[in-house]
Image: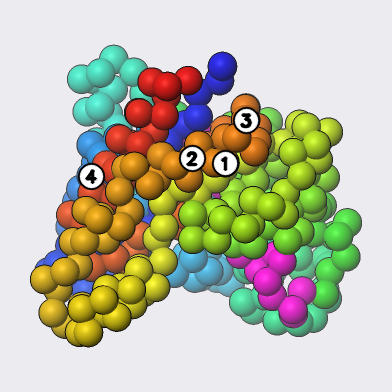
Amino acid sequence: MAEIIFDDIGSFPLPAETSREWMAGKFAEKKSDKDLFRIVNDAFMKKVEAGVEVPTYPQYQDMNEQFLSVIRDPERTEEPFKVRIADARIIELEAIRPVAKAYREEKGEKLNVRVCVTGPLELYLKDFGGTEYVDILNVLAESVNRFVKNSLSNAGDFNIRTVSIDEPSIGINPQVMFSDNDLIKAMDTASSSAKKAGCDVEVHLHSPLHYKLACQADNIGVIGVESAATPSYLDLIDVEELEKSDSFLRVGIARTDIFNLVSVLNEKYDTNVWKDQAHMEEIVTRMETPELIKKRLEKAYSMFGERIKYAGPDCGLGSWPGQDMAAQLLRNVASAMGDFRKEQ
């Protein structure tokens, strides 16, 4: 039986003393910075130490501007919206090189890493909204592919196991004007280097309503579903469709919708838990427990069996109130998956 792999989506809380504005300023400089790199490294290692088997580099940038700020820059492009390969850098991957090297020297093996890039449709909608310029969509897809290609070329001391294309608007945003074939082509272009390199290629959908688009894409092999907060999403997916296209799932088994979780506590204690945080820890001690997380995984497995390849939290943890609590959720997932494996 193939073992389900524990990964995470990416974003993570900042240290208490660090502001998003300071981080944005450092990232805007597009260069190595020891203080910035230390924060990224520390967050990345918290994921590794919590038991995440294929961690994503900590995402501390806006998912669109991280790529569009480079793609829009005429000094970094060879034609409009087509980034030069040398400038298609994911700074966070450069930041984790020292810890990846230390891990390799200590463990004698490379860390497996998940790379998340914003999909071409999402980038297009950010700048062009509900229009339909297929040529621009295709150029953006090529630029996304170049970010991936450059990352693969410079991985060095770590192994890029998974490349995820983040396309939250598919199935949600009514502004999408492109045909299914145009979207499938864009996804295939954006993930072509990852597929060629032998990576698992995932599309992360916030709604699986149009998951069949990903099934039809030649280069996409894994479909990410946020199924912990919305279990009914799994009912939209046909296991026979997955088998026919040889596609797999990445299922969410721990809720990350922190504002909804806190609202439950607000109602329970008739208080504002964001201000009075005495009860905040209940989210990881009484609500999102290893036992409940394991039950979600068991339910998903009963439906899809070995068509599940990855599991982890629904989405990123960047909005959570602190790093310790976010890391505890990851440990809860690790515990749940460990118990699940023992019973298989």
Side of 56 relative to 308 (left or right): left
Percent coordinates x, y for residue 131 in the rendering = 79, 81
CB-based contact (under 8 Å), mark 4 and mark 2: no
Q: Nearer the viewer, residue 48 or 69?
A: 48
Q: Nearer the viewer, residue 217 or 334?
A: 334
Asked if one can make out residue 25 in the rendered structure from this viewpoint, the answer is no
- The residue that label 2 is drawn on is 297
- Residue ID at (11%, 71%): 278
Q: Nearer the viewer, mark 4 or mark 1?
A: 1
- The earlier-in-sequence mark between 4 and 2 is 4
Mark 3 is surrounded, within 10 Å at the Cα level, by few (under 14), some (14 to 19) or many (20 or more) other residues, namely: some
| Chain part drawn in magenta | 160-176
**Marks 3 and 1, how far apart at CA:** 8 Å
The image quadrant where one finds the N terminus is: top right
Q: Residue furthest front?
A: 268
- The residue that label 1 is drawn on is 300
Mark 4 is surrounded, within 10 Å at the Cα level, by few (under 14), some (14 to 19) or many (20 or more) other residues, namely: some
Q: Which mark is residue 46?
A: 4
Percent coordinates x, y for residue 234 in the rendering = 64, 51
- Residue ID at (41%, 57%): 255
Q: Is 300 inside the magenta-drawn segment? A: no
**Marks 4 and 1, how far apart at CA:** 27 Å
Mark 4: secondary structure = helix
Q: Is 170 inside the magenta-drawn segment? A: yes
